Every structure is written in structure tokens, then in C-alpha cells.
């Protein structure tokens, strides 16, 4: 059993040798860890091409035999051995790098197929164990293979420096991690009792290792390393005249067994941008998977009453469960600026290892990459979880670096997913919770806003642009998405900003009054429709009662929205009137829109303040001796002059609205599916749609191709 199998012919061509060894790997003969077969397999240049149906056939045969051979477990162990040897090799390129790349790639192919076609919830089909007479050699750690493998992969990523010689191996290991973590795609929703062997193993690694992995993934994102193309990389996996892995069109994945799951188009830039870096992109996606994972732990026994419905049992488990600490999230949340460690200065050093990063470089990288949805999620994760990074952002004087991409994406909301719009709005809401931020954005003047098409915006403040874009998002939501949560976030941010508004532009001021007008017309129309329904149906039927109830609920929502807008206007008039003559002008110009609500019980107190302001400035206008007709400039001049004599007499002081963002109790129900949707759309990784239960997917007819071709070739065997 320990001998290496002989090749088909004495002088077999490399392609025949490779096909033979892969055939042995997927076959029914088990080769022990000590067999020379593994070295022969991993030393192959792997430059042959297989069509997709051959790949499917090989995977099917492997799935049938892995229970007996345990070859998946064995190649994973050899991968870790290669990584350990590679990490100890400081002399640059060597054959061990090639073996590690090949091991990671071959493992990914067959591991992915087994996960996609798993029938059990705990993925028993992986058979990640060895026979009793075998063990992981030269290792005194826990003999659990999954833990051994994840420790080896994470250790290499976290401790091995990135260089031209290790770039491909780092990239391949990140791809392996994506495959290994893809068990999450098979679950219907994150819930108690979920088994995800590899990601669960990643969660129990020591804190020093976790810290080094998070730091490396973030540094990859910050530095955005490009694939070396100067020829230095080509000989890395070559020996003598043997063709190297990178010698041809791409690499292992481009030539050997062309799986759709992985496209090595990274040897050329995917875009014309100088920031394109597949390694950085994949590092970010792996980091997002890690930091948003939540492992549910039951605090007490489930309901004993077996007759309880699944829904009741689910609810009981959620109420009586807790979540294990996610060390990767903790590492991200406790990351410190390498330039200035505030905690150490204060003498309250964080216990345990801390991720230290150049916050300035991270800030700049985020600003460059925010058109990418995964970067938006990283920014959210940092601002929400890491108080040091949030504080760093708030004191930056170039807030436009982050805010302009965010506002441009909201401007193009129709081209964005609803999830991305939520993330962008939550980012603005988190920032608006700080009064210094709200003051700063109005002092930063933008020479122009080239992407804004409706009108030319010259020398407008960043704060005014925020107001315009938030109001525009509300209007877009009203016409397209009709999402109450989105409305609330927009208005909450505007409310937080209102007391600190400074010299709001004429355009932004007009938009603010127009927002009230638009909501009031929606409210009035809805109230009329509801009254008509009540009159016609007279609530005589259950259906009629239901319709009226739904309309009443919607009317109540619009009432709340209108009140918030009035409170926003009130806050500007109460706390910042002298600094905002354009707001006063806009209110005076459209004062008729407030009249229908003057006696409304929910609005009358707020409108009293608005009419106090209107009465003051209208009387000053009436008293003004004016030759000729009034112009906008003349009206504004009168307003500016009289702002100096405004002392707020007769104004009622209301408690300032202060909105804060809080995550839901079970954020994993949103973030885990969202992260995997991002990963599937951005990484080049594809997964059998029929096996995805984490979120709804469309399964087009052509996706059945692999299964059909597998049936067609079921009687064939690989050459052995």
C-alpha cells in the first residue's frame, strides 16, 4: 500500500501521468499518508486541460470512494505539511510552494463538490478522519483534522510575509478558505445547532493567531498588492526545463480541471483602475465571512413538549440561547492605530494581543474602494464596532474622502441593491450621532460635484450636499422601494444634523421644504382614500375592515414622517436660525404648504414655532420701504439683516431629536446571507444553486448542465 503506483508507461507524457495520478486519487484504493504517491501527485505541473464533464465525473467517483480512502483528509494534511515546510523556507522560490498551491487547489475542487452534494446537516460526507492505524505525524496538537488544517492555513496566512514568491499561495489559501466556509450556503438560516466544521474550527484558534490573521487580511486590503508580472514569478514553480504552473495562460486553475467555481483571471487587471487587486478583494471577503459569523449556544434544554410547532421551538431556542464570542470580530473591534495607541497612552492597555494598523492608510483605502459593496460593509463594521477608528474618522478634516463616494452611491440608488443602500444610510446615521461631525461637514466647501446631474453645484458645503442626497433618497424610496426602514434612517440622519446646520445652501433649503410638501400631499391623498373606503364599506365586512386598518397604519406612518420633518425644520430655526437665511427664505417662499396642518393635533405645536418665525420676517418685509419689485437678492438681504435682531422670542423649546443606530438582536440573520451574496457576486466563486438554502436563488435551466453531463458520463472511468 505504501508504494507509489507505477505510471501507465515507462515514458508516459506529463498529461498521461497527471491523469493517471488524479485517477488514483479519486479511485477506490487507499494510500496511506506515508506513501510516495502524495509527493508525486503534488509535484505535477498540472498544465493539462479537462472539460467540465470530466471534472464532474472525477468528483462523483471521489465522493463514492472517499469514505473508504479518506483521501480528502490526507491531502489536507499534506497541504498543511507543505505550508509548514514553505513557511520555514526563507530562500525564496522552491518546489514546496508548488506543492502547497497544488494541494490547496486540488483540495478545494473536491471539497467544494462534497459540500455542494452533502445530504447531512453535519457534513459527514467529508469524512475528515483517518483510520485507527494512522495519525497526523510529527504533531503533538489535538488530532482533530479540521482543527489541524485550519490552524495550518491560518498560521501561514497570519505569519508568512507576502512576497512575489508567496503571492499565489496566499491567494490559493484564501480561495480554499472560501470553499471550506461555504457550508454556510447550505443552511436555510443561521440557527442553533448549525455545524460548519471549518469555520467553527477557525473560531477556536488562539488569540495571537487570530490577531495576526485579521492584521494580514486588513494589510492586504490596505496595500492592495498586484500580481507580479515582471517575469520574476514565472520560475517559482519550475525545475529545470519543466513547465511551471504559471508558464501558460494562467495557472493551475486556468489549465487543470476547469471548474466554474474559480476563475484565475487575476494575472491581468480586472479593470483599468490602479487599485485593482484580487488578493486584496479576496482577503476582504474572507475577513467579512469571519467577523460576521455567529455561533449560537443553547443556555438550557429545549422544550420537552415534542408537540410544539417548529416555529414555537425556534422562538424558544432563540430566547434561551447565547452567542459564542467571535474572536475575529473582537480583534477588528479592538484594532488600534499604529501611529498613536490611545489606550496605551492612557495606561489602560488592552489585555491580550492587539491588531495595530495604519488608520490613515486604512482610511485612504476605504475612500478609494467604496464603490465596491464589500468595502462599504467593512466601513460599516469598523464604524459600528471600533470606537477608536470611529473617533479617528470624526477628527479627519477631509471627510469628503469617505463621504463623497457614499453620497454618489446614494445618488445612483437605482443601480444599487437595497442592502447596500441600507449600509450606506447606516454609515451616515452612525457618523451623524457626533455633533462635531455635523458641524464639520458644513464647513467643508466642495468646489463642484461633477456627478450631480440635476443642476450645477458650485462651492456648496458637504453638509448641504448630504441634505440634498438624503432628501433625494427619501423621494426615490417613496416612488420605488417604499421601505419604512429606509425612510426612517434618512430622516434620522437629517434630524441629527439639524441643530448644527450652518449656511445651508439655497438648493438644500428648497429641497427640505419640498420634502414636507411631498409627504403632506401623500398624507392628504391617503387620508382622503381611507375616508372614502370607510364611507363606502362602512366596515361591514372583514375584508373592508382589513383594508381600512392597513390604510390607517400607513397613514400613521406618514404622520410620523411629517412630524419628523417638522422637527428637523424646528431644530434649524430654534438652534441655528441666524446662520441659515436660505432656510428662512425657502419657508417664506412656500409658506402655504404648512397652512393645512396648522390645527392638526400632532403638528400644531411645531407649526406654532414656524409661524412665529414667519410672522417675524413677514412683518419686517411689510415694514421695508422698497422701490420697484422684490427680487430674490433683495428678500435675502432683508432676511440677513433681520437675522441679527432675531432673539427667538415666543419660540417653544423642544427636546432635540437624537437618533442612534442599534443592531437588531440577531444581526447574523441579515449579515451572514448578505456577506455570501457579496462573495458569490464578487469573488468569481460559483456554487451549485440547487444546494443554496441560505437565501432564495433563481435556478435557470442551464444550471442543470453539470448534473445532466454527470449522468451521461457515469459509465466512464478516468484513465488508471
Image: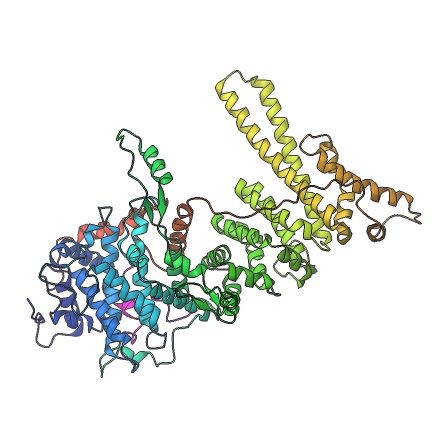
Rendered position, 409 above or below 490: below
Q: Nearer the viewer, residue 88 or 335?
A: 335
**Residue 112 visible from this viewpoint:** yes
Rendered position, 546 above or below 671: above
**Residue 250 visible from this viewpoint:** no
Residue 616: percent from the left, percent from the top?
83, 42
Residue 711: percent from the left, percent from the top?
18, 50
Q: How is the image coloured?
A: rainbow
Rendered position, 546 above or below 677: above
Q: Quadrant of residue 29?
A: bottom left
Q: Which residues are magenta?
A: 245-270
Q: Residue at x 27, y 62 (%)?
A: 150
Q: Residue at x 16, y 61 (%)?
A: 71
Q: Quadrant of residue 305?
A: top left
Q: Mostly what secondary structure, the magenta segment?
A: loop
Q: Is residue 252 magenta?
A: yes
Figure quadrant of the N terminus: bottom left
Q: Nearer the viewer, residue 439 or 701?
A: 439
Q: Nearer the viewer, residue 464 or 379?
A: 379
Q: Residue at x 29, y 45 (%)?
A: 193
Q: Is residue 103 left or right of residue 565?
A: left
Figure quadrant of the C terminus: bottom left
Q: Nearer the viewer, residue 511 or 386?
A: 386
Amino acid at each position: 500500500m505504501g508504494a507509489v503506483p507505477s505510471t501507465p508507461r515507462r515514458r508516459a507524457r506529463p498529461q498521461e501521468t497527471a491523469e493517471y495520478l488524479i485517477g488514483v486519487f479519486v479511485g477506490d484504493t487507499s494510500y496511506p499518508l506515508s506513501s510516495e504517491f502524495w509527493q508525486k501527485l503534488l509535484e505535477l505541473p498540472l498544465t493539462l486541460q479537462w472539460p467540465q464533464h470530466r471534472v464532474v465525473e472525477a468528483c462523483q467517483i471521489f465522493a463514492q470512494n472517499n469514505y473508504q480512502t479518506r483521501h480528502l483528509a490526507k491531502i489536507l494534511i499534506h497541504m498543511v505539511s507543505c505550508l509548514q515546510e514553505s513557511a520555514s523556507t526563507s530562500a525564496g522560490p522552491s518546489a514546496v510552494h508548488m506543492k502547497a498551491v497544488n494541494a490547496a487547489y486540488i483540495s478545494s475542487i473536491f471539497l467544494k463538490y462534497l459540500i455542494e452534494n452533502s445530504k447531512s446537516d453535519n457534513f459527514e460526507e467529508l469524512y475528515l478522519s483517518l483510520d485507527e492505524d494512522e495519525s497526523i505525524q510529527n504533531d503533538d496538537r489535538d488530532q482533530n483534522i479540521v482543527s489541524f488544517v485550519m490552524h495550518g492555513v491560518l498560521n501561514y496566512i497570519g505569519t508568512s510575509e507576502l512576497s512575489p514568491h508567496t503571492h499565489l499561495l496566499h491567494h490559493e489559501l484564501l480561495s480554499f478558505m472560501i470553499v471550506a466556509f461555504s457550508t454556510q450556503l447550505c443552511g436555510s438560516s443561521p440557527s442553533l445547532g448549525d455545524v460548519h466544521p471549518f469555520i467553527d474550527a477557525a473560531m477556536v484558534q488562539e488569540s495571537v493567531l487570530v490577531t495576526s490573521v485579521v492584521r494580514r487580511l486588513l494589510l492586504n486590503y490596505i496595500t492592495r498588492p498586484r500580481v507580479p508580472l515582471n517575469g520574476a514569478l514565472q520560475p517559482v514553480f519550475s525545475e529545470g526545463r519543466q513547465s511551471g504552473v504559471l508558464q501558460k495562460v494562467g495557472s493551475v486553475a486556468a489549465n487543470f480541471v476547469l471548474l466554474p467555481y474559480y476563475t484565475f483571471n487575476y494575472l491581468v487587471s480586472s479593470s483599468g483602475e490602479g487599485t485593482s487587486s484580487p488578493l486584496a478583494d479576496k482577503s476582504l471577503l474572507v475577513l467579512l465571512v469571519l467577523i460576521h459569523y455567529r455561533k449560537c449556544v443553547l443556555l438550557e434544554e429545549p422544550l420537552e413538549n415534542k408537540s410544539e410547532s417548529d416555529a414555537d421551538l425556534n422562538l424558544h431556542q432563540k430566547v434561551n440561547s447565547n452567542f459564542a464570542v467571535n474572536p475575529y470580530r473582537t480583534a477588528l473591534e479592538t484594532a488600534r492605530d499604529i501611529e498613536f495607541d490611545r489606550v496605551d497612552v492612557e495606561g489602560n492597555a488592552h489585555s491580550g494581543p492587539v491588531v495595530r494598523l495604519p488608520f490613515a492608510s486604512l482610511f485612504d483605502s476605504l475612500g478609494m474602494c467604496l464603490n465596491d459593496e464589500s468595502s462599504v460593509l467593512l466601513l460599516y463594521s469598523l464604524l459600528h464596532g471600533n470606537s477608536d477608528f470611529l473617533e479617528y474618522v470624526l477628527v479627519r478634516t477631509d471627510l469628503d474622502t469617505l463621504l463623497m463616494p457614499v453620497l454618489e452611491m446614494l445618488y445612483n440608488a437605482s443601480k444599487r441593491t437595497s442592502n447596500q443602500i441600507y449600509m450606506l444610510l447606516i454609515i451616515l446615521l452612525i457618523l451623524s450621532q457626533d455633533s462635531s461631525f455635523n458641524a464639520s461637514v458644513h464647513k467643508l466647501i466642495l468646489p463642484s460635484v461633477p456627478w450631480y446631474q440635476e443642476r450645477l453645484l458650485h462651492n456648496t458645503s458637504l453638509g448641504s450636499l448630504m441634505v440634498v442626497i438624503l432628501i433625494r433618497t427619501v423621494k426615490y424610496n417613496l416612488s420605488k422601494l417604499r421601505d419604512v426602514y429606509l425612510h426612517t434612517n434618512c430622516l434620522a440622519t437629517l434630524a441629527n444634523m439639524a441643530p448644527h446646520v450652518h449656511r445651508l445652501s439655497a438648493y438644500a433649503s428648497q429641497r427640505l421644504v419640498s420634502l414636507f410638501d411631498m409627504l403632506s400631499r401623500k398624507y392628504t391623498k391617503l387620508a382622503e382614500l381611507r375616508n372614502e373606503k370607510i364611507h363606502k364599506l362602512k366596515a361591514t365586512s372583514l375584508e373592508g375592515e382589513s383594508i381600512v386598518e392597513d390604510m390607517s397604519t400607513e397613514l400613521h406612518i406618514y404622520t410620523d414622517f411629517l412630524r419628523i420633518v417638522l422637527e428637523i425644520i424646528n431644530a434649524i430655526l430654534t438652534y441655528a436660525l441666524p446662520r441659515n437665511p436660505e432656510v428662512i427664505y425657502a419657508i417664506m417662499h412656500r409658506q402655504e404648504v404648512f397652512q393645512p396642518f396648522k390645527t392638526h393635533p400632532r403638528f400644531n405645536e411645531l407649526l406654532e414655532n414656524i409661524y412665529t418665525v414667519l410672522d417675524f420676517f413677514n412683518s419686517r418685509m411689510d415694514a421695508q420701504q422698497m422701490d420697484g419689485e422684490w427680487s430674490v437678492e433683495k428678500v435675502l438681504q432683508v432676511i440677513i439683516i433681520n437675522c441679527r435682531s432675531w432673539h427667538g422670542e415666543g419660540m417653544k423649546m423642544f427636546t432635540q431629536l437624537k437618533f442612534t443606530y442599534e443592531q437588531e438582536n440577531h444581526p447574523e440573520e441579515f449579515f451572514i446571507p448578505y456577506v455570501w451574496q457579496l462573495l458569490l457576486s464578487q469573488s468569481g466563486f460559483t456554487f451549485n444553486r440547487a444546494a443554496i438554502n441560505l437565501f432564495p436563488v433563481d435556478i435557470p435551466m442551464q444550471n442543470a448542465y453539470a448534473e445532466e453531463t454527470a449522468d451521461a458520463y457515469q459509465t466512464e472511468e478516468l484513465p488508471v
